[in-house]
Image (cartoon, rainbow, N blue to C red):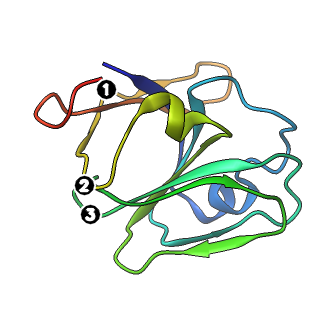
Amino acid sequence: MKRVCVLLADTFAHRALGLLARSHLHARAGIWLRPCSSVHCLGMRMPLDLIFLDANNRIVRLEPSVLPSRAMRCAGARSVLELGNGSVSALGWQLADQLRVGVARRTPSSGRVWHSITVSASEHSN
């Protein structure tokens, strides 16, 4: 089972800052923008893989290698995972895959919330 660890951005301030302060991402790490149906990469210093999810955390759109200064929107999306470039290919996640969200862990130093996300076993296997 392939898994990612994402920082939850569920406030306006956290979503607005997003990944702007970063120049790279570790493999299988990113940010989960919730609620969100459109993103921009203005000011970013790296390409990102975008995974748009519906209200049930089912993948409704995959956009690999979105370059800085681009914008993407997905009707029907309720949240977006922004992951490091190449993550979509490495994870093997596909349209309509159901993502399962693990138990939240709070980082003691910052108080920020991290989630582990995997593809449900009932979907395809990798």
Say which amino acid is labelled 2: Ala
Q: Give the Cα distance between marks 1 and 2.
A: 22 Å
Q: Residue at x 83, y 59 (%)?
A: 68
- Closer to us: 7 or 61: 61
Residue of label 3:
55
Q: Residue at x 76, y 63 (%)?
A: 41
Q: Secondary structure at mark 2?
A: loop
> What is the x, y in percent for residue 31?
58, 43
> What is the x, y in percent for residue 71?
70, 73
Tally the numbered discs.
Answer: 3
Residue 21 - label: none
Q: Secondary structure at mark 3?
A: loop
Q: Residues within 10 Å of mark 3 (few under 14, many from 20)?
A: few
Q: Residue at x 82, y 51 (%)?
A: 20
Say which amino acid is labelled 1: Val
Query: Which marked residue is nearer to the observer: mark 3 or mark 1?
Result: 3
